[in-house]
Amino acid sequence: MTPDMQLALPARAENIAIVRHAFGALGEAYELDGQILSDIRLAITEACTNVVVHAYPDGEEGPMEVQATLLGEELTVVVRDKGEGIGPRPDSPGLGLGLPLIASLAENVQLGRDEEEHTEVRMTFSLFDAPHHYEDSGASSTAADSSLPS
Amino acid sequence: MSDDRFDLDGEPYRGTASLRLAKGPLVGPVLCRVVSMVLARANCPMDRLDDAMLICDALSAHAPDHASDGHVSFALSAQSGGFELRVGELPEQAADELVRQAVLPGVGNVLERMTDSLRVERTADGRHEELVLELRF
């Protein structure tokens, strides 16, 4: 199915804000609940940050692609790069909380590679359920794909 | 003070983005937001940002009428001093028709008045047209 929105940008930190704004506009257009939109934007920010920080070796620039597809009451968002893929990185500058955070915010998360062997994070959000609440994070995380690395 | 906007590493700013949107409610809001962000980072003055928003409004109102497969494509490129916006995947004659449609009562043709350059190009594969708009600031 062809996505409703496809956005491709250089994988640079400054462009994460553009992705966030694009999803703000998507939320307005689809009249999404504010809390749900906030969760979606946070999860996408984490996924895009992973691309900026991890996908390309130092000094090399590559693309960051974001797709959104609305199907019924579910929004599927795919964040994709053409870089090195997801793997252990002992020198990672982050705390390693990005993927668990995405898993707690999305109904479902899948990490993998597309048909062209590009790394992708595929997140599905339910648009009309009660929003996740941080004090009940245990309940929300059980809905996510249990195959995620910690 | 220089008018040029620089990244932290000292390189002149150059912003690019490509956008493909399904015909419908997303086109206007998403196009305007992305263009305004890219232009703001290129140090675009407010009056030209206003012009760009009028252009985006005109394009989002009429470009979906010419969507060849239910989607409209845009390619943005901004740097200090200028901005280029390409409306892609348009069928034959659609680019000229899109320009003709961009008339506001009392204002005239928004695309012709607000841009510094307006032209039609063919895509590399020759199957589609692209409307190329340039703003200088």
Image (cartoon, coloured by chain):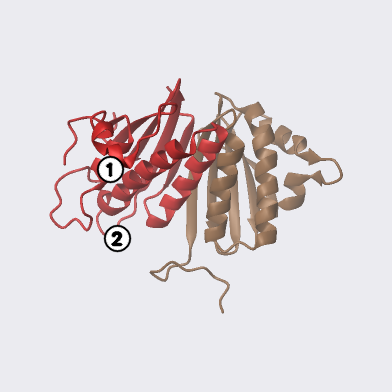
Chain colours: A red, B brown
Q: Give the structural element (helix, strand or loop) at label 1.
A: helix
Residue B42 higher or lower than A117, as above or below: below
Residue A18 position, x and y percent, is: 47, 49
Q: Are marks 2 and 1 in contact (CB under 8 Å)?
A: no
Residue A115 position, x and y percent, is: 29, 28
Q: Amino acid at mark 2?
A: Gly
Q: Give the structural element (helix, strand or loop) at label 2.
A: loop
Residue A21 higher or lower than A1, as above or below: below
Which residue is painted at 26% across and 59% down in the image?
Answer: A58
Q: Quadrant of residue B67?
A: top right
Q: Which mark is residue B67?
A: none
Q: Which residue is mark 1?
A: A101
Look at the image and tell me in which quarter the C terminus of chain A lies: top left
Q: Quadrant of residue A132?
A: top left
Q: Quadrant of residue B110?
A: top right
Q: CA distance from mark 2 to mark 1?
A: 28 Å
Closer to the eye: label 2 or 1: 1
| B5 to the left or right of A100 | right
Q: Visible in this render: residue A110?
A: no
Residue A41 position, x and y percent, is: 41, 43
Count of all numbered marks drawn on residues in the image:
2
* Closer to the camera in the image, A10 or B46: B46
| B66 to the left or right of A126 | right
Instruction: Using the image, name the chain to which the residue with label 1 belongs.
Output: A
Q: Which residue is mark 2?
A: A59
